[in-house]
Amino acid sequence: MTETGRKPVIVPAEPGRDTVEAVRRQLHRLLEEEEIRPWHIAVLCGLSATKSEIWKKRRFGNVELWNGAIDEGGASLGLPAEEIPDTPPDAGIVLFETVRRFKGLERPVVILCELPETGARLDQLLYTAFTRATAHLVVIAPPTLAARVGPT
């Protein structure tokens, strides 16, 4: 994140329902209270899209998570980069992507969720994920990982 960005928000949430609810609350806060444009936000998942509860839910009030490169079940459509459709111009569309697939890309605001608590490549995943936000980062993580990455 750039030095001009805001302090990251760390939200402890148990995997599953608690994480889904935390994503819903953060999307509401960012879109409704802070009036951030939906296309300035990316929801990045530490899991594959096929295992993501966030992707399965996909609709949060008036907001829909979208990714033109994956199907309803989260499987890759196998499209070359030039054939992936642009984000729909709908005001209620927020990009959903996995951390690994978003490597090298950025958004002003990133909501990071569904992170593993441990793993041989966890630090590398966190570094990649944390550096995708140019202005503001929200980390929704299991309580032990949330405590590790920063104060709430």
Image: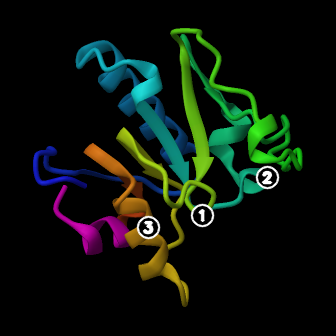
**Snapshot quadrant of residue 72:** top right
Task: State the residue position of label 1.
Answer: 100
**Snapshot quadrant of residue 61:** top right
Against 106, residue 141 (above or below) is: below
User: Residue at image x 36%, y 72%?
Assistant: 144
Q: Residue furthest left?
A: 4
Q: Specify few, some or many for label 2: CA neighbours under 10 Å numbering under 14, 14-19, or 20 or more.
A: some
Against 144, residue 16 (above or below) is: above
If you read the primary sequence from the N terminus, does the residue marked by circle 3 or circle 1 appear first? 1
Which contiguous range is marked in magenta?
144-152
| Helix, strand or loop status at disc 2 | helix
The kind of residue on which mark 1 rests is Arg
The kind of residue on which mark 3 rests is Thr
Instruction: Kindly tell me whether residue 13 is visible in this rendering.
Output: yes
* Horizontal side, residue 11 vs residue 40: left or right: left
Q: Specify few, some or many for label 1: CA neighbours under 10 Å numbering under 14, 14-19, or 20 or more.
A: some
Instruction: Give x and y (percent) for residue 65.
Output: 61, 29
Separation of marks 3 and 1 at Cα, in angstroms: 8 Å
Instruction: Give x and y (percent) for residue 19.
Output: 50, 47
Q: Residue furthest front?
A: 82
Magenta region, main secondary structure: helix
Per the rendering, the mark at residue 50 is: 2
Instruction: Give x and y (percent) for residue 63.
Output: 54, 17
* Horizontal side, residue 72 vs residue 97: left or right: right
Label 3 with label 1: CB-CB less than 8 Å: yes
The kind of residue on which mark 2 rests is Thr
Separation of marks 3 and 2 at Cα, in angstroms: 20 Å
